[in-house]
Amino acid sequence: MARQLRAEQTRATIITAAADLFDRQGYESTSLSDIVGHAQVTKGALYFHFAAKEDLAHAILELQAKAAQQVVDDIEGRGYSSLESLMRITFCIARLAVEDPVPRAGLRLATADVVVRAPLRHPFTEWLEFATRKFSGAVKEADVNSEIDVHVVAHSLVCFFIGTRVAGRALEPVARLPRRVAEMWYLMVRGLVPVHRRPRYLTLATQLEREIRTG
């Protein structure tokens, strides 16, 4: 049992070290030797758990997918409107990225040349489908203008969210991400939501950003 626990701890250490380097340096620029040095483990220990760098990337994407699904399950069970659920989930994902290098690396790996193996689906596919469902629900609930193309808006949201992190990585600390997500929603709410319903969602964006900032 003790040996198994140590093996699990070593695996977690390697994943965290790889995630930190993938996020800071990029997947392509990070070598297994870099990861061994950052994790402070032997090459034998790394190869015991992961045969290749691609295996590490896939493990990180799996953990990110699991964390994101937990967020979705939690928010979806609270009875929020479709638009509020979508907003809350984006802020929760931002919080995960701020607090944990694994989800943070997952955001960057989503834009890297990493083959996603079945049954795991590419994050973009999952996020696009989810956002499309939520915008469709928001149209039915009259929180979003009915003339919008929900597929186009969902695609724009996903690209906006990921692009915010990608563009900001070299320019500002990750702690700035929740503020950027709030700014994203200020723009989207003003462009998508009927005038009489905008104050609710603009206030919500401010509230959610403040909750992350204050912990």
Image: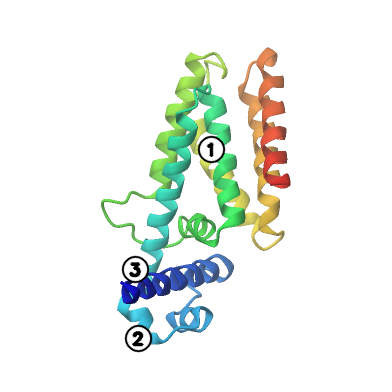
Mark 1, residue position: 89
Q: Residue 142 appears in which quarter of the rendering?
A: top right
Q: Local crowd at mark 2 within 10 Å, few (<14), some, or many (≥20)?
A: few
- The residue under the point 42% across, 87% down is 42
- The residue under the point 66% across, 57% down is 174
Amino acid type at image mark 2: Gly
Decide which of 104, 180 is in the foreground and name it. 104
- The residue under the point 37% across, 82% down is 45
What's the CA distance linking mark 2 and mark 1? 39 Å
Mark 1 lies on a secondary structure that is helix
Mark 3, residue position: 55
Mark 2, residue position: 44
Q: Local crowd at mark 3 within 10 Å, few (<14), some, or many (≥20)?
A: some
In the image, is residue 146 above or below residue 14? Answer: above
From this viewpoint, is residue 50 visible? Answer: no
If you read the primary sequence from the N terminus, does the residue marked by circle 2 or circle 1 appear first? 2
What's the CA distance linking mark 1 and mark 3? 28 Å
Tell whether 67 sits left or right of 49: right
From this viewpoint, is residue 70 visible? Answer: yes
Q: Residue 167 appears in which quarter of the rendering?
A: bottom right
- The residue under the point 50% across, 66% down is 19
Residue 170: image x %, image y %? 67, 63
If you read the primary sequence from the N terminus, does the residue marked by circle 1 or circle 3 appear first? 3
If you read the primary sequence from the N terminus, does the residue marked by circle 3 or circle 2 appear first? 2
Mark 3 lies on a secondary structure that is helix
Decide which of 58, 74 is in the foreground and name it. 74
What's the CA distance linking mark 3 and mark 2? 15 Å
Q: Residue furthest left?
A: 118
